[in-house]
Image (cartoon, helix red, strand yellow):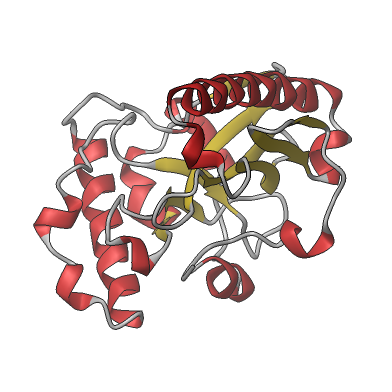
Amino acid sequence: MCGAWTPMQAAEPTPVAQIKNRNIDARIMLDDRIKADPALAADCLAEGRRWLDKNAAEAAASRKQDPQLFKDGGWDFERIYQVRSVVVDRYVSVIRSDYMDTHGAHPNSDVNTILWDKTANKRISIRPFLSETADNGPTMKAMLQAVIASLKVEKKKRDAADTATAEWFKDLEPRLLKIGAVTLAPSTEAGKSSGLTFHYPPYAVGPYAEGEYVAFVPWETLKPYLSPEGQRIFGGGRPKGDENERQ
């Protein structure tokens, strides 16, 4: 799958939670940096267990409805939580990657993100870093424009310019909950973030064959819209390795 970021697959880590029966083999993985933070680990694990239970119930119901769908075995699901960055030793960006095989035409995958505040021990949004985040407001409009510009560059790199169209970007809106799953990008300046990265699973902004996409918005683009906390945490540039590994 083009563009997917799943380095943990090679390491074959031990699941922290698993449901395995004739209907499904579903697993939750946490990377070592998450395991080292008890509050973050507990939060991810609780969410992961709910995901396991939901998919196990759906698999059981599907077998009951049509046992033939399981003649080649049960469903295969995996969720991996990985730290993407830690900024000012407080804000932890986590990538949540899902793999799902229900014996359809091909397996599917999904990606989402978590922004964790180590001081408050809770999930937060990027609102504290921006002076205003109103739907269709100036900040979100500027952010969406920068996201689409980045996606068009990435599509050109993949020789996929024919799908760099408004039709494929129509589901992205200038609203925090509709612009994409966001993380704080690492920086060449220690402890800072170089900007925001937005993560899109297959089908979100392109056909399945194009895989996942990551859009990068440098902090300089957002400078007019940063809050005092945003001004404190952003700085430096995006490390070259980060761009190569995730796009």
Specify the quadrant of the image occupied by residue 46: top right
On the question of residue 112 being in view, the answer is no
Most distant residue in the left direction: 166
Q: Position of residue 137 (x, y in %)?
A: 18, 31
| 53 vs 219, nearest the viewer | 53
Specify the quadrant of the image occupied by residue 211: bottom left
**234 versus 2 height, above or below:** above
Q: Is residue 37 left or right of residue 111?
A: right
Q: Position of residue 139 (x, y in %)?
A: 26, 37
| 190 vs 109, nearest the viewer | 109
On the question of residue 206 being in view, the answer is yes
Q: How many tags in the picture?
A: 0
Q: Give the residue drawn at x 54%, y 65%.
A: 246
Q: Give the residue drawn at x 38%, y 55%.
A: 202
| 164 vs 149, nearest the viewer | 164
Q: Give the residue drawn at x 35%, y 81%.
A: 157
Q: Position of residue 125 (x, y in %)?
A: 48, 27
**237 versus 28 height, above or below:** below
| 227 vs 26, nearest the viewer | 26
Q: Is residue 141 left or right of residue 20?
A: left
Q: Position of residue 44 (x, y in %)?
A: 70, 27
Q: Is residue 186 left or right of residue 198?
A: right
**218 versus 179 height, above or below:** below
Specify the quadrant of the image occupied by residue 218: bottom left
